[in-house]
């Protein structure tokens, strides 16, 4: 799993460097603002992919004395940094688009830009397909965020190619700043989605309701379990941390109770890749006793 994420991160960085080089050359040849917007996005990709490459290596480090829960949140920091980079790119493009609307400039040699965009689309499609397979096998948040970014790039590359075609065919020079502005809005929306997901992980947001229901279903399938409460979950990279209190029959021996929780942990770690499970054993009915004490305390 670790080697897969490393290879995916390296592939992303390589593609970002290639596309930035191609778009820089095409941008100088055409003077297209839409192509410049795409170039800025690709330059942000270079930095973001480098961050992803480093964060994936860090997040896969095993727990140590200073980081008892591992280093998985490095991926959340990476995704948050990507969101900031993309948002900054969007602001720059909007500023340039307004200026180009006020002072229109014709696009030179648009065919060069069209060919560059066609190459970018083909290469990006290949990368996204590879990243999708890696995410399916590893669940890596950093690779998922990077893949989402490149899927957005497909749309921007198509839009830029269309604006260059309109400048080349009908001679609609206004399409260039218009598409640049649309790309900028798309980048801003994309940045918000990446940042929100990263903040959710860094703030230890609970797993979705369907995932919690799956956990509860696995536990409830054991007839020895009389109840489960205080279920808590959080994500750190591709690892999910699951904590809960399980009620077991009072007459059950410590050894038998331990065997039951061992089986539950094994099933949860099979159902959830890279899960870290912590189960606290309690005697049956303990929650009722606590509730009674709380009620008595309030009454006093």
Image (cartoon, helix red, strand yellow):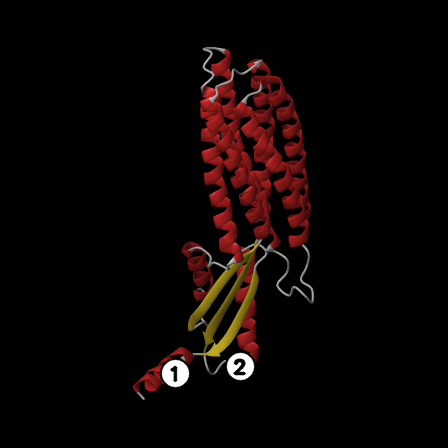
Q: Residue 262: x and y, percent?
A: 57, 68
Residue 86 image point, x, y percent: 54, 39
Q: Residue at x 66, y 27 (%)?
A: 21
Q: Are marks 2 and 1 in contact (CB under 8 Å)?
A: no
Residue 3 image label: none
The local crowd at label 2, few if under 14, some if 14 to 19, many if 20 or more residues have their Cα within 10 Å, is few
x 36%, y 80%: residue: 291
SS for tag 2? loop
Q: Nearer the viewer, residue 196 or 131?
A: 196
Which is more toward the observer, 31 or 124?
31
Q: Residue furthest front?
A: 103
The residue singled out by tag 1 in the image is: 289
- Whether residue 14 is visible here, answered yes or no, is yes
Find residue 63 and report its horizontal and vertical position in percent: 67, 62
Question: Mark 2 or 1 closer to N-term?
Answer: 2
Q: Position of residue 168 (x, y in %)?
A: 51, 12
Residue 253, numbered circle: 2
Q: Residues within 10 Å of mark 1 (few under 14, many from 20)?
A: few
């Amino acid at each position: 799993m670790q080697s897969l994420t490393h290879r995916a991160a390296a592939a992303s960085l390589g593609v970002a460097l290639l596309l930035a080089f191609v778009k820089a050359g095409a941008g100088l040849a055409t003077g297209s603002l839409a192509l410049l917007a795409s170039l800025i996005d690709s330059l942000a990709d270079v930095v973001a992919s480098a961050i992803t490459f480093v964060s994936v290596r860090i997040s896969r480090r095993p727990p140590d004395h200073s980081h008892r829960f591992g280093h998985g949140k490095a991926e959340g920091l990476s995704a948050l940094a990507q969101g900031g980079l993309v948002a900054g790119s969007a602001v720059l493009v909007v500023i340039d688009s307004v200026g180009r609307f006020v002072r229109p400039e014709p696009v030179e040699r648009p065919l060069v830009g069209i060919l560059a965009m066609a190459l970018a689309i083909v290469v990006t499609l290949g990368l996204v397909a590879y990243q999708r397979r890696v995410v399916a096998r590893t669940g890596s948040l950093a690779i998922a965020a990077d893949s989402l970014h490149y899927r957005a790039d497909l749309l921007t590359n198509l839009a830029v190619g269309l604006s260059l075609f309109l400048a080349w065919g009908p001679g609609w020079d206004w399409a260039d700043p218009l598409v640049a502005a649309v790309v900028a809005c798309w980048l801003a929306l994309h940045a918000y989605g990446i940042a929100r997901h990263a903040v959710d992980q860094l703030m230890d947001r609970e797993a979705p309701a369907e995932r919690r229901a799956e956990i509860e279903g696995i536990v409830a399938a054991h007839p020895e379990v009389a109840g489960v409460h205080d279920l808590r979950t959080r994500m750190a990279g591709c690892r999910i941390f699951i904590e809960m209190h399980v009620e077991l029959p009072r007459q059950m021996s410590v050894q038998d109770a331990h065997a039951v929780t061992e089986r539950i942990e094994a099933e949860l770690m099979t159902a959830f890749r890279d899960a870290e499970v912590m189960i606290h054993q309690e005697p049956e009915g303990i929650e009722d006793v606590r509730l009674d004490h709380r009620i008595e305390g309030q009454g006093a």
